[in-house]
Image (cartoon, rainbow, N blue to C red):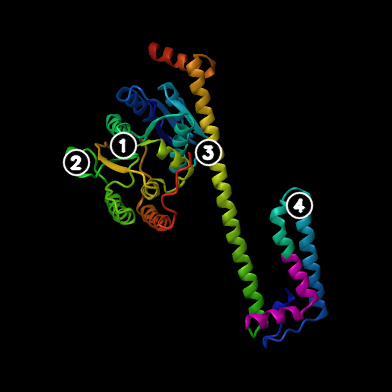
């Protein structure tokens, strides 16, 4: 079984090498791909030095486009399962390995690593979300649960594992600037099995969160519009191969 | 265009002078469009709408009664209001049209960038499998450096 682990990275030269080493240690059989989203620092060089494949987008395209690049690479190159995690060191690779195990065992098509799942909160006090993030999280949680009729606790998690059905779907449809939430809604509406798994997350090593209060408000507003529009998309259309 | 300056009563009084100025402006506008196409600054498929707008201006200057007919059809007593509404709606439609075109082009550019990135990673994978090529050498050098340090 061929496994691809990809890491979207934008100006993460300080952290990316450590993340790659962590993945190679915890998921030995996997190919590691760094999707360099138009970084202006030495992210791509650091990634190659750490032994990863590098797909460089010529200019910054946003997280959604970077993730889609990874799914597209997995689909085109015949990988059976894939997973992605953040490049800033928040996601321990051994947790990603657990997500992959779920997909490999065919218990789900798409598995999300959740920081807020009951099991995860009890297991670690490592991750402390900020106030605005907590508000945003609970709003999205409420509306996504309403839209999909399935309970999600961590809607913006960037730690996921997926099989080829998901790769086929996401390489065709993936919102460039509102990736995480819309993709969950889309996957559920297409009849895929989406599952959350409690995971341990850490404080970020490098970089800063892009969320200021004003941007958070805009982010939430945009998210709600996207969810509303998503409800009118066709259901259960076969994902193109 | 010169109809904008018509009397407040709603009756259109066009002097031959304003009609001539409007017609000249319309012709000048269309010539500008044609020149942009000729110099490859504007593609034909995006020029049609502007030429139509120019023809509309010309028609308005040549046949002032036309606007009154349109105003009557809209149920608007004041021809000035009819003119402004029409132009406003036209511009709104054009702006929306441009946003749609822009979105499509943004999606195309993203896919192009992704294809390039994937091709780059695939080539790197092939080179590393063959153990040769520039990327393989780079990896070797990186290993040497990490041994030395």
Name the residue beneath numbered marker 4: B37
Name the residue beneath numbered marker 1: A204
Q: CA distance from mark 1 to mark 4?
A: 53 Å
Q: Secondary structure at mark 2?
A: helix
Residue lying at 33% horizontally and 22% vertically, measured from the top left? A28
Disc 3 with disc 1 on a shared chain: yes
Q: Secondary structure at mark 1?
A: loop
Name the residue beneath numbered marker 2: A119
Q: Which one is closest to the eye, mark 2 or mark 4?
A: 2
Q: Is residue A199 visible?
A: yes
Nearer-the-camera pick, A209 or A184: A184
Query: Is mark 3 in CB contact (under 8 Å) with mark 1?
Result: no
Callout 4: 10 Å neighbours few (<14), some, many (20+)? some
The chain ID associated with circle 2 is A
Query: Is mark 2 in CB contact (under 8 Å) with mark 4?
Result: no
Magenta span includes B66: yes
Identify the magenta region: B53-75
Query: Is mark 4 in CB contact (under 8 Å) with mark 3?
Result: no
| Count of numbered badges drawn on the protein | 4
The chain ID associated with circle 3 is A
Q: Which one is closest to the eye, mark 1 or mark 4?
A: 4
Predominant SS of the magenta segment: helix
Q: Quadrant of residue A126?
A: top left
């Amino acid at each position: 079984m061929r496994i691809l682990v990809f890491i979207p990275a934008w100006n993460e030269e300080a952290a990316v090498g450590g993340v790659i080493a962590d993945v190679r240690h915890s998921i030995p059989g996997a190919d590691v791909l760094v999707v360099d989203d138009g970084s202006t620092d030495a992210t791509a060089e650091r990634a190659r030095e750490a032994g990863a494949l590098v797909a460089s987008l010529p200019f910054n395209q946003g997280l959604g486009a970077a993730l889609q690049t990874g799914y597209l690479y997995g689909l085109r190159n015949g990988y059976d399962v894939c997973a992605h995690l953040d490049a800033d060191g928040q996601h321990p690779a051994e947790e990603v390995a657990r997500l992959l195990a779920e997909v490999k065992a065919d218990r789900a098509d798409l598995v999300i690593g959740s920081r807020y799942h009951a099991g995860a909160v009890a297991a670690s006090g490592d991750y402390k979300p900020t106030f605005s993030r907590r508000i945003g999280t609970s709003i999205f949680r409420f509306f996504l649960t309403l839209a999909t009729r399935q309970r999600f606790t961590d809607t913006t998690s960037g730690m996921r594992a997926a099989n080829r059905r998901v790769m086929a779907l996401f390489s065709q449809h993936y919102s460039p600037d509102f990736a995480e939430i819309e993709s969950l809604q889309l996957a559920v509406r297409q009849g895929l099995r989406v599952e959350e798994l409690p995971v341990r997350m850490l404080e970020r090593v490098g970089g800063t969160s892009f969320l200021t209060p004003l941007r958070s408000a805009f982010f939430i507003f945009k998210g709600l519009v996207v969810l509303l529009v998503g409800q009118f998309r066709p259901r259960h259309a076969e994902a193109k191969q | 265009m010169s109809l904008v300056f018509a009397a407040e009563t709603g009756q259109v009084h066009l002097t031959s002078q304003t009609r001539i100025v409007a017609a000249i402006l319309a012709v000048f506008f269309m010539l500008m469009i044609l020149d942009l196409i000729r110099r490859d600054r504007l593609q034909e498929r995006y020029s049609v709408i502007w030429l139509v707008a120019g023809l509309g201006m010309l028609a308005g200057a040549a046949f002032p009664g036309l606007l009154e007919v349109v105003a009557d059809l809209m149920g608007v007593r004041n021809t000035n209001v009819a003119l402004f509404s029409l132009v406003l709606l036209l511009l709104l439609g054009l702006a929306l049209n441009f946003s749609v075109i822009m979105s499509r082009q943004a999606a195309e550019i993203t896919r192009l960038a992704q294809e390039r990135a994937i091709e780059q990673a695939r080539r790197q994978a092939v080179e590393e499998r063959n153990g040769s090529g520039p990327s393989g050498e780079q990896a070797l050098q990186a290993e040497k450096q990490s041994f030395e340090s």
